[in-house]
Amino acid sequence: MKIIGIDPGLATTGVSVLEVENNKFKPIYCDCIITKKTHSIKDRLNKIFSSVDKIIKDYHPDFLAIEELFFSINAKSAIKVGQARGVCILAASINDIGVFEYTPLQVKQAIAGYGRATKKQIKYMLKNILNLGDKDLPNKDDAWDAMAICICHANNYKLQKKIRDAIR
């Protein structure tokens, strides 16, 4: 099973692809889509959409897992993140991929076992879960967050499958 994980944002969108086989996680892509503030919103959203669409076409994931919108005090920022989420979900829809949404709390619990884990704790746990060395680490937190979202979905999917199998 392959999962594309997305940490959406208008300026920076983290994107990761994780392959899961026999309960082993293999990261196969982890990077960020960066858009410039000097470009129009239309061009920025188009770049996010076309980049996610290309990654989907290149890696053929089975699922897209994306972080749910986190409402903060700044409504303008939340709207921009919502637009970025929308074009990512559209790319999945056009490519007929199931979309699953997770809150930041769910992602942190899946990785660190604690919903208020810090970025440093999440990075530490991801290094251990994925068996990565320092040279293998992505530079941006958004790429890390996208990988964490992949792992959150993989764990959720396995749990849901066990429940479905037990009911049968």
Image (cartoon, grey):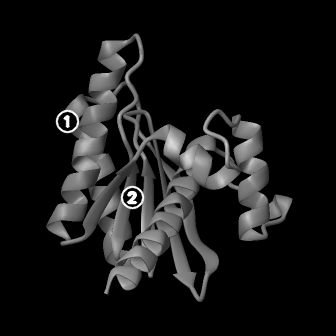
Residue at point 50%, 39% (across, down):
104
Q: Secondary structure at mark 2?
A: strand
Measure how far apart labels 1 and 2 are at the Cα level. Answer: 24 Å
Q: Secondary structure at mark 1?
A: helix
Residue at (64% x, 33% y) in the render: 116
Q: Nearer the viewer, mark 1 or mark 2?
A: 2
Q: Position of residue 29 (x, y in %)?
A: 55, 68
In the image, residue 52 above or below residue 11: below
User: Which residue is located at x 31 percent, y 75 percent?
Assistant: 57
Up-down relation of residue 99 to residue 113 (above or below): below
Residue 76 seen in the current view: yes
Residue found farthest to the front: 167
Q: Is residue 33 left or right of residue 20?
A: left
Residue 65: assigned label: 2
Residue pictured at 39% horizontal, 58% vertical: 65
Q: Is 117 situated left or right of 94 in this image? A: right
Which quarter of the rendering shows the C terminus?
A: bottom left
Which residue position is annotated with label 1? 42
Which quadrant does the N terminus fall into? bottom left
